[in-house]
Amino acid sequence: MPLGAGAILKGPTWLFWMIPFACFSSVQTQMQLPTNQENFRFTYQMYNGTIPENALGKVYIKTSDKMGIFLHNPSSVSVEFTIIEGDKNGIFHAESTQEEDFCFLRVRTKTGGYWRLNREHKHEYLLRIKAIGSYVTGTTLETYAVLNVTVLDQNEFSPLFPSNPFSVSIPEDTALYSSIAVVKASDADVGINGEIYYSLVEPSLMFAIHPTSGVVSLMRPLSPGTRSYELEIHAEDRGLVSGDRVVSPLSNTKLRISVTLVNKYAPVITVQKHQALVENANLGTLFAVLKVTDADEAMNGEIGEVAIVDDVRTFRIVPSTDSSVFNIIVAGELDRELMPSGSNLSVFAVDRGSPPRTSTVVIPFYIEDMNDNAPVFVRDLYKAEVSEAVPIKTPVIFVHALT
């Protein structure tokens, strides 16, 4: 009786040859055994199946494949399945169920086992299964197949934020609809069990969070004078939650928002008094009073310097007891003859913000003339000749003097 490749032949096959011819014919009719290896093999070399994680004992692997072996003479053979590789912790057990001419392979979890299926620890098993066919003749055949078992995720974990709160600093002039922060949680589950949705615990008109990206945006102008905000954010996955799962406190976190001041405004210089100047006025004479203000807060609203542009000899700025008021006094000689058409005085102010802002004001002035110069003749000596017959009131000579 020939055997196919890979078959293991055991038992006294010679007994068949010792049966008398008449009996042999009867035996051959009733026990015609296909002991060829080609007739004893799995329907497929590899099967695919799934099982939920945390499955208790006697949970069977589900598969769309027909796992097992066709039997050409089912009454003459018994089949046993054994897992020989891929299950080092002894989680699974292989069973055989014979229905008519087919022996089904069924794989389940063992009862009372110490190990349990944990997808986060191991998400796939490659089980090598050995089938042994024992024929009544004593012949034994073996064949092999692989069952690829995927452990299906159960929604057993809550999304988790880092233990420390999130924090961010934003300028007070942050534009509306700007993204100001990103919060991220993690979930050890997969699929929809690991997809995270974010939400604000307390609804807010000023801030909004994107449900899937965790991006926090500014939706309303920041409140003037408010320097900090705190948002509580909740993370939740999309999976079905079992009744015994406890939501972790780390599924909530806080976002602390600090508002930093911005040097938005330049100083404003207002000329409160502007007096006329008289030539040769006394040193220290008040010329103008300036009030310098800044709408910013803190350092950004403090005035760092008020000074005159270029001309530092004729005028000088003197602070007053009011930190926002500055006096401009005469510090040098005023000569109208040097500036007959008047001139302009430029004053700038700089705040202490970062970066600093500067403003400039131009103050026109005109110097009133004083009679401080005697006329001067162009010549020291004039000569003229007059005829004795000249009429009365006839011009004799023209003289010229300068003032």
Image: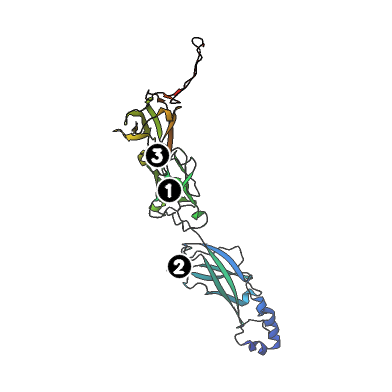
- Eye-nearest disc, 1 or 2: 1
Question: Label 2 crowding class (10 Å Cα cut-off): few <14, some 14-19, many 20+?
Answer: few
Q: Which residue lies furthest to the top in this view?
A: 392
Residue 177 percent coordinates (x, y):
49, 41
Whichever of labels 1 and 2 marks the residue nearer the N terminus, that label is 2
Q: Nearer the viewer, mark 3 or mark 2?
A: 3
Identified by mark 1, the residue type is His
Above or below — where is 282 with respect to 227?
above
Location of mark 3 (residue):
350
Q: Do the residues labelled 1 and 2 touch (CB within 8 Å)?
A: no
Residue 234: give its label. Answer: 1
- Based on the displayed image, in which of its 4 quarters is residue 14 positioned? bottom right
* x 60%, y 68%: residue: 47
Quadrant where the C terminus is found in the figure: top left
Q: What residue type is labelled 3?
A: Val
**Residue displayed at 44% across by 56% down:** 157
Observer-nearest of 379 and 180: 379
Say which of 395 and 211 sits in front: 395
Q: Which residue is drawn at 54% across and 66% down?
A: 149
The residue labelled by disc 2 is 111
Between circles 1 and 3, the one closer to the viewer is 3
